[in-house]
Structures are given as C-alpha cells and as structure tokens.
C-alpha cells in the first residue's frame, strides 16, 4: 500500500506540471489581456503596467519565471485585485466554499443514499417509482431555478431566513439545499443501480438460501459492493463541491471560490486563472487518491496495482 | 417512519422560524446610522490613482476628498479640502487655499505638499495610472508622464506654502474644477511605508494601513463579501457627517440585489432588473427612482470598410430606425431617443437634434449610394459585447433595417475582452458602444472621435473636426464662442455619421424612503457626507410582492 501511495503521489507531479503548462499557454491564446478596457488606455500607460508585471517579456521568459514562483508555492499577484496575491484570495475564499460544499454534500448523502437504498430494496413498487421520479426531477432542476424558488418560499414568503449573504448559520441552509438536492438526486439513482446489480448476484442468492436475515444481507454483503460506483464518484464530486459553485454563489451572494473561477477567465486575470485551475487540480488528484484507497479497502476484489 | 419524518420536519421548521432575527439588517442600520449599499461589483482597487470604474470611485469618494466636491443636487463644485480658490484672468493659473482644519485620518494636517505628492505619484510613469491623461492640460504633465521629463519641479504643480496649492495649465480648461474634484491628496508617509511612490498594488490600501482624508475611514474589506467604512473623527467637517458608517456590498447579480433590497438587507441598490421596473412603479413608487445619466448609447461604423466608407450609407442607416419604439418597447427604462452624441442636460451647451428619422430620405440616400431598395447591398455583420440588453436592441434594429431599407444584417456577440480586441483591430462593420462623460462638458464626448484618440475605433478622420476640438476650442476663453466651436465640430461628426446615436442613458435604482440626502444625478455622484438615515420615515421592514 505504501508503494501504491508513493507511486500515485509521484504521478501527481507530472500531471500538475502538464496542467500548469497547458493552462499557462491556453489562457494567453484568448484575445485581450488583463488591462484591456472598454475605454482604451494610452499605449504608454499600458506599457508601464505590463512592465510592472513582467508581461512585456517574451512568453517563454514569463513561463520560466511563473514556474519558478510556482515551485516555491507562490501563485503571483492577482491582476484584477492588485493589492492581493492569488494565494491570499484562495485562502480567503476556499474555507467559505469548502463549508458550503460540505453542507451541500451532507444534504446529498443524507437524502441520496437512503432513498437509493429504499428504491433498490422495493424495486418496481411505488416506494421505488415515486422517489426516483423526484430524483429525476431534482437532477433536471438547475440550481438557478431551484435557488430562487427556495428563496421565494423560505426568505420572501415565510421570512425564516435572509435571501442572501453569508453571515450566520441560517445563511447556510438555502445554499446547502440548492447545492445538495441535485447531488442527492444523482446519488440516489447511482445507489439504486449499484445495489440492484449487487442484489442479483449469486452470492446474495446464496446468503438468502442460507437463511441470512435480509437486513444483514443488505448491510454486510450488498452495501459494500453496491456503493462502489458511488464512492468512485465521490472524489471528483468532493473536489467539485469544495471549490464552489458560481451559480449558487451568485444567487446567494456567497464570497466563495466559484466566482473567482469564472470571473478570472472573463477578466483575463492570468495568475488567478492558473491559480484556481491548479488548486482544483490538486484537490481533484488528492481526493481521487483517497477514494481509490477507500475503494480497495472495502472491495477485496480490487488490488493496489 | 412517516411520523419520524414529520417530527424531523416540524422540529426543523420550528428551529428556523424561531431563529429569524427580530430586526432586518436595514432596521439595524437605521438604528446604528449605518447605510447599506449595493455596489454592483467587487472593487478591484481603492487606491485613488488606480481606480477606473464607478464602483471603485464610489468607495474612494468616502475615503478621500479632493480640493472641491460636487453638490449632489446642482452638480456644481463646492469647497471641500480647499475652502476657496482663485483663477487667473487668462484661465491658466488656479490657486487653491487649503483649510487649516483639514486632517488625515491619523490626525496629521493635510497640506499643499500632500497634493503635490499625489500629482507626482499619479503622473509617475512607473505607476501606469490610467487617470494620468486627465492631467495632461497641466504644464509639462504629459512630458513627465511619458518619461520625457524627469524633474517634477518643472510640472505645473506648486506648493508655495503649506496651505496654498497652485496649478498652472497650458490652455484654459473650463471644466477643470470637475477634474480636481476627483483628484484627492495622498499621505506620503503611508505610501512610502509600504513601497515606492510608483509601485502598484502595495498593501497601503488594506484596512489598518490606509490613511485618508475623507469623511470615512476603511474598517474592513473582505473580497466579494463586504467593504465597510466608519466615520472619520479627524475629518474637518465631522460634525456635519450624519452617518456612522457605510457597508458596500458587491452584489453582481441584479436579481440577487433586488431580492436583498426587498427582504430588508439593503438601503440603496446599484441597479435593478428591467423586469421589476413596472412592479415597483405600480406597487412601491416611493422606492423606485429613475433619471438621466450623462451618457449615450450608439453604434459605430467602421468607415474603412465598404459599404460604410460612404457617408450616405451611414446616414441612411441612422435615419431608418425608430428610436422612440426602441426606448418604449425594448429598453423600457425611461431612456431618451438620441439625435446627437452629446446628451442634453449639458448646461449651456446644446447642439439640438442633428438629424431626423426619415425613412423616405434614408431610402433615397441608399439609392444614391448605389443600392436602390437595398439591392446589391452586401450582407452586414453587427457585433455587440455579450449582454441580453444589447441583443434585444440589436434585434430590433436588425428588423427595422430589413423592413425600411431591405438590407440583411446578421448579429454576433463577443465576450467583452474579445470584443475590445475586435474593435481595436477594426475587424468589424457595425459595433455597439456607449460612452459617458465624467464631467459636464461636450469635450468629454467629442475628443473620443479625434483622429489620434485611442478610443476612436471607427477609422473616421476629419482635419477640420480635429482642429476645432483639439486646437481652437481649448484656446478659446469665451464660453459662448467655445461652445459654438464645439457645436460646429459635433455637427461635422454627426453630418458624416461615423457613429449612430440611439439613446441617452438613464439609471433606474431603488432606495428606501428613510435614506435622505441621496439624489439621482447625471454623474451618479453621491457625496456621503450629505446622506443621513431618518428611521421615522422608514417603510415596511420587508417589501411584500403584492400586485
């Protein structure tokens, strides 16, 4: 297992290098630059600003310099928010996104897995059709529709929570539901199909023939393998929810990372684009590794190869 | 199982309903004298020399104060850090007398030297300030900014004593006081504590570091969440500042902002969704405010490409649209149809309508240009930067041109940065643009279309126009004669029609009745020292969506 972990860790380095290199050159291919504005600024002024950030140097020189800083963990200054570094902006926004993501994931797991289990165990009965229809509806309902609907009911009509902001714990409820309901729907469907497949296996039939109680069959024999597809999805899902959702952050006015991801690209804030892409890549690779380890631990058929 | 679910739901509901706060943020603000403002977007910078957008400038206006201030009602310059000033008879030398009571937020006195230091900083080539060009009318300022002159003492700024600040111009600038209003002093020791005079992005603008001379001082700044300022006890007129603080919320989505306003989280919004205008007009007219801005929405023609190299074609297109229909049925925000580049409300300057809508005449002009009834007219591309608002206007104009002139236009949208590159490289035929003037003078609009101006994307060049705008008008002291020259220039511009005016902008915003001293004005300038909250005038805590 140690060998497996070391090998996977070492694989992360070239992947990050390739991601950084590709992103560095791709973001420069986009027309316009961080300082092109609707009102043209004098060429001399633009030249001064570009000199300040080293953008007047040839691209390969800029690349070598950027990679040098990157090795030291320095993601550089943000061009859009010149007083702050990309490291500071991510450090400020990530905890917010991570908190929101964990609440959202909690909602998704809390509703998704039990509903999926019940559907699989009561397959082709109303206890299967009804939640699965809702799940399909939940998956199709985009967050920019669901969010305002929840606001309308709980903030505007009932007045239980504020419509936007990120100040006290009640501000977490509606965004977490908006983020979690779509995930719950996906998880429910995935749990159901995973469990159905396992429940038709020979070893389950054998267990039933031997008279093992149904709850033990589910908990001890079926659940472990049945949740394999769910767990393999968890790595990317976790990286995704922790790094924020642009739409949910915009609807609820949440100071998370998702807004940086999207706005940095529009602003051509090169360092912020690269910083957020690399940050996302690191999270994705680490979570994938963690869930691969968990998968092997719960599924004896898989090996650390 | 079902009972368990019901119990969980009821507990959650009880918990939620129990926890909702007794007062809305607006009610708390009314109680504490804290104004809650929607700021549109997150300020990218609050260094007065590096800000460019209104959203940033609104915050700088709370933290710094220039020599003069604009009266929120009349928009006329009134004394601020300078208590008086004189102008030499030739209009070239301005002498400002700085108040002896003016203080920085750390208690240091504000001196003329601080103003000289600020001008040296904004003009330093290394700083790359995008506002530097606004100082080019000052003697040697342009040469210093471009690095051709290194001795700042030769630039037309001087401080003969700590309370006298003298500015020498190369030609009279009738709107010069509007320029100095947005040009505050800078605290030298603070700048140099965090970096060199010409260093961008140092940490002097962060809370705890910044020293300003405005009515408020920076308290907190959390990106994408809130920027908070508190009353500055050292401000020279602190006794007349009514608010204890202001919170600026960078809410980008107008829908989110409107919901926050309705649920009692904001006193004033930065904008509002078009779809809600009718609702507020009918149900909450006291909250809805709409007024003109000093800005014009127009289309530009690339005159270097056929068929737009012919003035007749450009004029025909401009005359064949129905602006009244556009503002009434498409934009619906009270916009005013535009028949000139410079908006009305420019005081003594008025050019009046420079052309009329006339479909028959438009057809005649098109035929004269070689395209009778639109025959043989090449397929034209109209581009705009991606926005729902621009799209619907472009579609309306596309139909009007098809119906009235029988010409086909295809529409393309581009993301803003891509769009700007397209305009700069003149790789377009017809493009949307809009321009505002930062001061009450036609110059703010007309200079953009001189041959060498970086913002002239049309390729249009007219020697007489350049001469009138750049050479004759600046050296004409008599305001009437100067306006006559600029009027002539605008008539030349519109006569040749490299741009097609569509409407003059208006602004629709929401503010609560307890907000006093807040006015809609042409420059969207709201000096916060004049604003106060009157809880006795407060409306309902939350606005119901009744019809």
Image: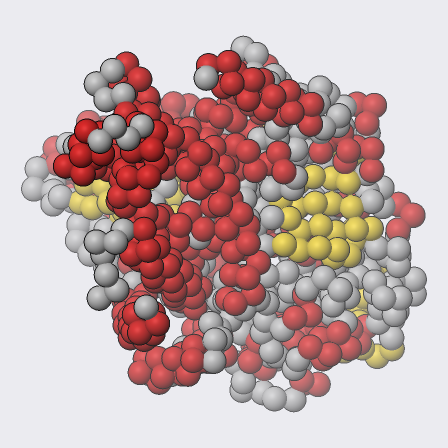
Is residue A131 left or right of A173 when viewed as pictured? left
- Tell me which corner region of the image, top left, top right, bottom left or bottom right, holds residue B144: bottom right
Is residue A229 positioned above or below B545 on the image? below
x and y, in percent, of residue B247 in the image: 70, 45
For the C terminus of chain B, give its image quadrant: top right
Residue in the foreground of this view, choosing between B467 and A53: A53
Is residue B57 left or right of A263 when viewed as pictured? right
The residue shown at (72%, 42%) is B72
Number of marks present in the image shown: 0
The residue positioned farthest toward the top in the image shown: B547
Residue in the foreground of this view, choosing between A300 and A115: A300
x and y, in percent, of residue A234 in the image: 35, 48
Coloring scheme used: secondary structure
The residue shown at (41%, 36%) is A108
x and y, in percent, of residue B490 in the image: 44, 50
Is residue B342 positioned above or below B163 on the image? above
The residue shown at (28%, 14%) is A126
The residue shown at (63%, 38%) is A169
The residue positioned farthest toward the front in the image shown: A210
- Tell me which corner region of the image, top left, top right, bottom left or bottom right, holds residue A121: top left
x and y, in percent, of residue B31 in the image: 83, 33
- Tell me which corner region of the image, top left, top right, bottom left or bottom right, holds residue B110: bottom right
Q: Is residue B317 at least partly visible in the picture? A: no
Q: Is residue B381 at least partly visible in the picture? A: yes
Residue in the foreground of this view, choosing between B143 and A134: A134
């Amino acid at each position: 297992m140690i060998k497996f972990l070391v090998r996977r860790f070492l694989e992360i380095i070239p992947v990050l290098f390739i991601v950084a290199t590709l992103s560095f050159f791709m973001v420069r291919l986009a027309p316009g630059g961080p300082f092109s504005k609707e009102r043209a600024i004098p060429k001399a002024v633009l030249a001064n600003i570009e000199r300040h950030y080293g953008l007047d140097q040839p691209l390969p020189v800029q690349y070598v310099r950027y990679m040098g800083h990157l090795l030291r963990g320095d993601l550089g200054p943000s061009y859009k928010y010149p007083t702050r570094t990309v490291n500071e902006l991510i450090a400020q926004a990530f905890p917010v996104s991570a908190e929101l993501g964990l609440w959202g994931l909690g909602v998704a797991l809390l509703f998704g897995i039990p509903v999926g289990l019940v559907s699989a165990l009561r397959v082709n009965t109303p206890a299967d059709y009804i939640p699965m229809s809702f799940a399909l509806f939940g998956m199709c309902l985009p967050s920019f529709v669901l969010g305002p609907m929840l606001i309308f009911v709980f903030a505007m009509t009932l007045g239980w929570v504020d419509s936007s902001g990120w100040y006290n714990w009640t501000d977490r409820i509606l965004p977490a539901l908006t983020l979690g309901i779509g995930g719950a729907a996906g998880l429910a469907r995935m749990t159901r199909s995973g469990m159905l497949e396992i429940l038709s296996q020979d070893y389950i039939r054998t267990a039933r023939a031997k008279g093992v109680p149904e709850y033990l069959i589910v908990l001890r024999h079926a659940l472990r393998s049945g949740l394999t597809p769910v767990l393999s999805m968890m790595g990317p899902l976790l990286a995704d929810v922790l790094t924020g959702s642009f739409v949910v952050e915009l609807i609820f006015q949440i100071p998370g990372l998702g807004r940086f991801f999207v706005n940095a690209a529009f602003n051509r804030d090169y360092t912020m684009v690269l910083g957020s892409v690399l940050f996302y890549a690191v999270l994705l690779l680490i979570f994938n590794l963690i869930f691969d380890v968990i998968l092997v631990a719960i599924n004896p058929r898989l090996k650390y190869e | 199982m079902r009972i368990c679910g019901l119990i969980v739901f009821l507990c959650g509901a009880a918990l939620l309903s129990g926890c909702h706060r007794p007062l809305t943020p607006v009610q708390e603000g009314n109680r504490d004298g804290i104004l809650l403002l929607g700021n549109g977007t997150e300020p990218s910078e609050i260094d007065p020399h590096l800000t460019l957008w209104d959203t940033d400038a609104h915050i700088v206006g709370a933290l710094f104060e220039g020599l003069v201030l604009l009266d929120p009602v009349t928009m006329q310059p009134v004394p601020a850090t300078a208590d008086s000033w004189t102008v030499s008879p030739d209009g070239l030398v301005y002498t400002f007398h700085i108040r002896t009571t003016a203080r920085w937020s750390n208690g240091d006195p504000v001196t003329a030297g601080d103003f000289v230091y600020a001008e040296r900083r904004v003009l330093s080539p290394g700083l790359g300030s995008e506002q530097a060009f606004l100082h080019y009318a000052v003697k040697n300022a342009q040469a210093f900014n471009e690095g051709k002159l290194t001795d700042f003492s030769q630039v037309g700024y001087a401080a003969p004593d700590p309370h006298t600040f003298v500015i020498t111009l190369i030609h009279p600038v009738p709107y010069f006081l509007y320029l100095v209003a947005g040009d505050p002093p800078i605290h030298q020791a603070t700048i140099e504590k965090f970096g060199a005079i010409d260093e961008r992005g140092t940490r002097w603008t962060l809370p705890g570091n910044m020293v300003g001379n405005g009515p408020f001082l920076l308290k907190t700044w959390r990106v994408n969440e809130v920027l908070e300022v508190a009353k500055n006890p050292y401000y020279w007129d602190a006794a007349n500042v009514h608010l204890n603080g202001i919170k600026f919320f960078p809410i980008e989505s107008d829908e989110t902002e409107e919901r926050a306003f309705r649920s009692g989280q904001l006193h004033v919004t930065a904008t509002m969704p078009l779809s809600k205008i009718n609702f507020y007009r009918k149900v909450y007219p006291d909250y809805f405010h709409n007024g003109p801005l000093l800005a014009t929405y127009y289309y530009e023609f690339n005159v270097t490409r056929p068929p737009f190299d012919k003035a007749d074609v450009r004029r025909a297109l401009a005359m064949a649209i129905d602006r009244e229909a556009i503002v009434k049925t498409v934009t619906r925000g009270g916009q005013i149809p535009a028949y000139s580049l410079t908006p009305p409300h420019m005081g003594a300057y008025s050019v009046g309508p420079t052309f009329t809508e006339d479909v028959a005449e438009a057809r005649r002009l098109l035929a004269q240009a070689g395209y009778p009834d639109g025959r043989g007219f090449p397929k034209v591309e109209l581009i705009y930067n991606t926005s729902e608002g621009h799209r619907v206007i472009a579609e309306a104009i596309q139909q009007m041109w098809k119906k009235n002139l029988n010409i086909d236009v295809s529409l393309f949208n581009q993301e803003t940065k891509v769009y700007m590159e397209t305009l700069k490289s003149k790789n377009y035929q017809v493009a949307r643009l809009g321009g505002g003037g930062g001061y009450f003078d036609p110059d703010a609009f007309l200079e953009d279309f001189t041959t060498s101006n970086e913002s002239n994307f049309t390729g249009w060049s007219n020697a007489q126009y350049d001469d009138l705008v750049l050479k004759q008008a600046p050296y004409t002291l008599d305001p009437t004669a100067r306006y006559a020259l600029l009027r002539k220039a605008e008539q030349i511009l519109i006569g040749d029609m490299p741009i097609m005016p569509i409407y003059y902008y208006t602004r629709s915003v929401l503010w609560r009745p307890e907000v006093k001293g807040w006015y809609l004005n042409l420059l969207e300038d709201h000096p916060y020292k004049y604003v106060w909250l009157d809880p006795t005038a407060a409306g309902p805590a939350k606005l119901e969506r009744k019809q």
